[in-house]
Amino acid sequence: MKNNTLIAYALLATATLSWSGNIVIGRAIRNDLPPLGMSFWRWFLCCLVLLLFTAPKFKRSLPVLKREWKLLLVMASLGIAAFNPLQYVSLHTTTAINVTLILATCPAFMALFSVIFLKDRLGWAQVAGILVSFIGVAIVITNGDLLSLLNVTFTVGDIWMLLAAVVWAFYSITLKLRPADLDPMVMLTTITGIGATILLPIYIWESMTIQTMPVTATSFLTIGYITFIASLLAYVCYNKGVSLIGPAKAGVAIHLMPGWVALLAFVFLGERLESHHIVGIAFIGLGILLNSRRVKASL
């Protein structure tokens, strides 16, 4: 059990690191690449790559796919077709601080939904872990000045991001419902294919009315990263991590993202790693440690 927990948090750390790079890139190229175009090509290519490995398994998985088609449709609609476009759209119209703050609400939503829909037990250590790691998030994004949160203003983009956070929490709940007889990679191939299919008509509309996907070195590099790192690697790690420890415990790993963003900026952008980053990351680590404890007394 302990080994499963360690493996789960290692997988979740890898996923959040990959997604942190996605946020940095998404903010940097927000005026160059359309959000729906990015989302469609991301998942269409993911599905093609996954099919190279999972196609032979589909025949024997067909009965369970037919049986669970409603669950798979919900998973694809939430985690593939809805969350990513909402996040990319929000990056067009809100600040990085606001996006990070709103993302930090995901663990609370996930814990709440786990209690309501999955009847999970939420112990005091888990509640403390969420709160402590949230303090760490706040320290990182406010440069150590927590009072500055009182001056944060919100925009229309924040509403999109809040909706994305709720969508992601629901997606995480559905992962716990994955049937044991469904191969995880077949499941991922299926939901990426369904998600890309849902996105296709909306992407065509975006191309005809708002912005087309440019064919440039930037677009190729961006799609390459979000396909292979922020999608294939991240989703495999995240899905497996949630399946090992459940959405309530896994959710707090999202609080790692502000720390990852700070480290990425330090490594790739030459930005300084300040003391408040270190303190914030320490709080986040403590919160995850508390959250990983076994549930004894529950709410």
Image (cartoon, grey):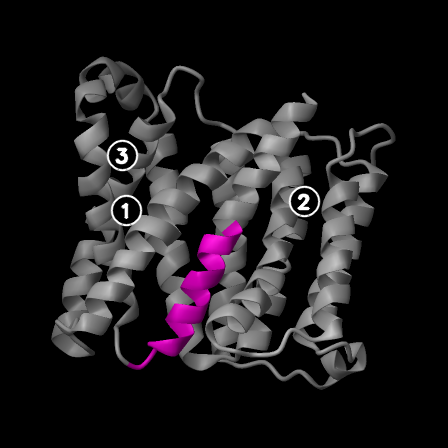
Q: State the residue position of label 1.
A: 195
Q: What x and y, as percent, mark residue 50? A: 24, 36
Tell me the tag on residue 112.
Answer: 2
Residue type at mark 3 is Thr
Looking at the rendering, which quadrant does residue 154 occupy?
bottom right
Relative vertical location of residue 161 with respect to residue 53 in this rendering, above or below: below
Q: What x and y, as percent, mark residue 110? A: 61, 45
Task: Classify mark 1: helix, strand or loop.
Answer: helix
**Gap between marks 3 and 2 measured at Cα:** 28 Å
The residue nearer to you, when weighing 24 against 105, is 24
The mark lying in front, picked from 3 and 2, is: 3
Which residue sits at x=65%, y=30%?
Answer: 5
User: What are the residue bounds of the magenta stretch?
Assistant: 16-31
**Gap between marks 3 and 1 measured at Cα:** 8 Å
Looking at the rendering, which quadrant does residue 217 occupy?
bottom left
Q: State the residue position of label 3.
A: 190
Task: Classify mark 2: helix, strand or loop.
Answer: helix
| Quadrant position of the C terminus in the picture | top right
Looking at the rendering, which quadrant does residue 106 occupy?
bottom right
Residue type at mark 2 is Leu
Decide if residue 105 is on the left or right side of residue 20.
right
Disc on the earlier residue, 1 or 2: 2
How crowded is the residue under tag 3: few (<14 C-alpha within 10 Å), some, or many (20+)?
many
Relative vertical location of residue 285 with respect to residue 260 in this rendering, above or below: above
Mark 1 and mark 2 residues within 8 Å of each other at the beta carbon: no
